[in-house]
Amino acid sequence: MSSSKKRSEPYKRILLKLSGEALAGDAGYGIDTDVLKLVASQVKEVHKRGVQIGIVLGGGNIFRGVKGATEGMDRASADYMGMLATVMNSLALQDALEQEGVHTRVQSAIEMQELCEPYIRRRAMRHLEKRRVVIFGAGTGNPYFTTDTTAALRAMEVNSEVVLKATKVDGIYDSDPKKNPHAKRYEELTYLDVLQQGLKVMDSTAISLCMDNQLPIIVFDLHNESALSRIVEGEAVGTLVH
């Protein structure tokens, strides 16, 4: 289907990507329960409409692998610690969603059977078909890959129609809108635009993966409470990368 058609038709299956930093709220670290409730209420609203939802969370609010590596820690060890942080965030979001009455499953790429299921693609798809929200933890299970790449990978594995990246701003800008009041917001971009201009949307591996498989990305404002609902209904919200 063309991207223009995608913007006018409701989505049936989505992959929501949330950064760990977004969960930290204004504190900059840890988990802000108000942000968790905000996310859970938005997901519940979309879930009630029959949309099948997968979620990938970052772990930067607890531990960032790359930062650990730049401070002298072995990169692979730092990345594994980052993966464990994403599982902590996944369990926190699962709890918030369950309190909203939304049935969820956490699947981890690193096996920890006392806490969550191992990631099994067919089982994940079955959960989605049964209208359970599936939260994918522990990244890809491999160091050197970001949770952006995980989001692109899991979206394609479970046949999601789109990756929805929730951020602190209402789309993609040519510069930081918090530092530059004249920053220009893009309505639409191509994958090559993002790569060539070095726009900080997702890392280049994730963008290339989406480009190779024609998986659209929509970047939107997490704190706009109606944004997620409007996007799944087909409205042009945020910035579309296609």
Image (tube, rainbow, N blue to C red):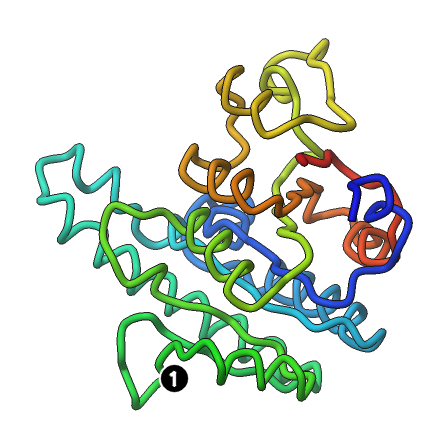
Neighbor class of circle 1 (other Cα within 10 Å; few <14, some 14-19, many 20+) is some
Q: Quadrant of the C terminus?
A: top right
Secondary structure state at the residue bearing disc 1: loop
Front residue (pair 241, 103): 241
Q: Where is residue 170 in the image (x, y as percent from the top left)?
A: 73, 35
Question: Which image quarter: residue 190?
Answer: top right
Identified at 53% across, 15% down, the residue is 197
Q: Is residue 196 above or below residue 73?
A: above
Residue 68 position, x and y percent, is 19, 42
Determine the residue located farthest toward the top in the rendered image.
182
Compared with 60, 31 (above or below) is below
Q: Say which amino acid is labelled 1.
A: Cys
The number of numbered discs placed on residues in the rendered structure image is 1
Q: Is residue 121 above or below residue 60?
A: below
Question: Quarter-wise, where is residue 107 in the image?
Answer: bottom left
Q: Does residue 157 sit above or below 180 in this rendering?
A: below
Question: Which residue shows up at 59% across the image and 19% down it?
Answer: 176
Residue where numbered disc 1 is placed: 116
The residue that appears at 46% across and 47% down in the rendered structure is 148
**Front residue of this view, candidates 25 and 85:** 85
What is the x, y in percent for residue 147? Answer: 41, 51
Image point 66% across, 44% down: which residue? Answer: 216
Q: Where is residue 104 in the image (x, y as percent from the top left)?
A: 58, 82
